[in-house]
Amino acid sequence: MTTASVPAVHAAGLHKSFGKVHAVRGLDLTVQPGEVVAFLGPNGAGKTTTIDMILGLSAPDQGSVSIFGHTPRGAIARGQVAAVMQTGGLLRDITVRETVQLNAAMFDSARPVDEVLARAGILEIADRKVEKCSGGQQQRLRFAMALVSDPGLLILDEPTTGMDVAGRRDFWNAIRTDAQRGRTVIFATHYLEEADAYADRIVLVRQGSIVADGTAAQIKNLASGRTVKASLPATERGLLAGLPPVESMDYDGGRLTVRTGDSDAVVRYLLNNTGAHDVEVAANNLEEAFVALTGDDAVPESTSITFEGDLV
Amino acid sequence: MSTAAVVQERKPSAGGVNRTFLWIEIKRMLRNRRTIIFTVFMPAVFFFIFGLSNKDKLLPNGHSYGQYILISLTVYAAMTAATGAGSQVAVERAQGWSRQLRLTPLLPGAYIAVKAMAALTLSLVAVVAQFVIGALAGVTMDARTWLTAGLVAWLGSLVFAALGLFVGYLMPSQNVMQILGPALAILAMLGGLFMPIEIMGETFGNIAKFTPAYGIGQLARSPITGEFDWAWILNVLIWLAIFVAGAAMAFRRDTKRV
C-alpha cells in the first residue's frame, strides 16, 4: 500500500510552557500505522500536554505535529483521529444513544450508532441518561464516541483512571479487540501493567521529554540489565574492587547486591575469585526500569507493584 | 491482516449546522425545568401580579395598560429565554463538552449558529406562552399588534442570546443563570419593562435610553403607543454589536486557553 509510509503520528521538536513550567521539552515521536503505543510516565511528565498538542487542542510553542500527513485539525475534519479523554466531554442531561447520535451528526460519514454502541458494549444502556452511568460506562461511551468516525488513530488519555479491576479488564479487552482490526492506538497511562500487557511499544516520558522508547523487554534491559545477589564474607569485601564495571553495588549484612548490564561476568568473577555463595540472578522488571528511568530522589525504595497512589 | 481502519484518504467533513445537533439542543432546553420556570412561569406570575390588576386602565392614547404590560413582560420573557439558552455554554464548558466538540469537524461558527437558533426557539416558546396567558386573561389586541410586538420581542431576543454566550464564555460557573437572572431583572427594570419610563423620573428615564432592553421594549410597544424613533433601532444594533463582539472575544480566549 502506497500510503503505508505516511506515519500515523509525526511530532517533531515539541515544546510547551505554561508560565515558568516547561511542560514539554523537545519531544519527538513517530508512530507507524498499526502500532499500539503506551505513553508511560509519572504525573506531570507532560503526557496530557503532549496529547493535547497532537490533537490540536493546544498549539505547541515550538515544533510541529502531523497526523496521517495532515494537520491535527485536518485529520479531525477527515475523521482520521479520535480521542478518549480522561474526564469530562459528556453532557449529563442526554442519553447514551443521543450522545453518540450527536457526535455522529458532526461527521459527513459515520458508522451506524447502534454498531458503535455494541462494539463499546453499551448497547443495552443506550437509553440511560449519561448522569446515571457509572464511571466505567461513561468511559465506554467516550470510546463509542471515538469509534463513530472509524478513525485510523485512536488516542486515549489515562482511559482507565478510576475504574475497578473488572472494569479495566473489560475496557482493555474492547480496545484490544478493536486494535486487532488494524487501528493505531496511543494510550497514556501510569499503570505499568497496562503498558506491559497491552502495548507493542512503550514510550517512557519524564519531565517533558522521552527517556526511553522500545518494547517492554527493551525498556527492561535499558534499566541496568539484571540484579545479582550473593552472600559474601565481610573479610572479602576488598576483592570487590576487581569486579567488572557495574551500575550499582550495595553490601549489607553479609549480602551483596549488584546491578549490572553483564551479569555473567559478575557471577563468573564472584565464583572464581571470591568465596561468594547462594548466588541469585534476577532480571529487572518494568517497575524497576520505570523507577530507574523516570524516578527522582523523592522516589521511595519500597515502591509497591502499581504506581497508583502518590507516585504518579 | 485485514484492516478495518486503514489509512484511506478521506474528504474533510463540512462541519456545518446540522439538523440532529439542532434538534437535540432544542430537546435539551425544553427538558430543562429551570429554563421553563425562568422563561414561562416567572413572567406569567409577574403578569398576574402587575398586569391583571391594572389591565383595564387606559393609557393617554386609549390603549389599555394591560396591553402595555403584556408586551413589556413578553419582551422580558423572550430576553430571559434567549440569555438562558446562550449561557448554557458555561455549563457545557464546565462539563468539557465544548472541548469534546473540538475533536469533531464541527466549525466554531456552526456551534454558535446552532446555539443562536436554539435560543431563538426557546424565546419563541416564551413569546407564544406569554401571549396565550395574556389572551386567556382577557387582553385583546388587533392582529397587527400581536404580530408586530411578537416579532420584535422574538427577534430582539437575539441581542440577549449574544449576551448569554458572552457571559457563558466568560464565566466558569455552572450556575451562571443565578447571576444572570437578577441581572436581567435589573436590566428589564432599567429598560422600562416593569414600569413605564414616563413614571421613572428624569434621571432613570435618561439612563433607561442607554440600557439594552430599552430599544426592544419601545419597538415592541410602538403599535400601541403609536410612536417610533430611529434611536431605538440604534440602541438594539449597538447592544447587539457589543454583545456579539464580547462573545467572539470570550470564545477566542476560551479556545486558546484550554
Image (cartoon, rainbow, N blue to C red):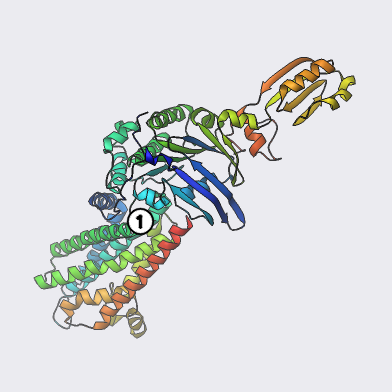
Quadrant for the N terminus of chain A, please: top left
Spot occupied by residue B245 in the image (x, y as percentages of width and height)? 37, 70
Q: Is residue A80 above or below residue A167?
A: below
Type of amino acid under label 1: Gln
Which of B221 and A238 lies nearest the eye of the viewer?
A238
Which of B42 and A153 lies nearest the eye of the viewer?
A153
Q: Is residue B108 above or below residue A40?
A: below
Q: Is residue A13 left or right of residue B143?
A: right
The residue drawn where x is 84% and y is 25% is A242
Please tell me in which quadrant of the rendered image residue A259 appears.
top right
Q: Residue furthest front?
A: A2
Residue B189 in sight here = no
Quadrant for the C terminus of chain A, please: top right
- Tag count: 1
Secondary element under disc 1, as helix, strand or loop, is helix
The residue drawn where x is 20% and y is 69% is B70
Q: Is residue B54 left or right of residue A211?
A: left
Spot occupied by residue B143 in the image (x, y as percentages of width and height)? 9, 70
Spot occupied by residue B62 in the image (x, y as percentages of width and height)? 13, 81
How busy is the neighbourhood of tag 1: few (under 14 within 10 Å), some, or many (20 plus)? many
Q: Is residue A212 left or right of residue B224?
A: right
Q: Which residue is mark 1?
A: B88
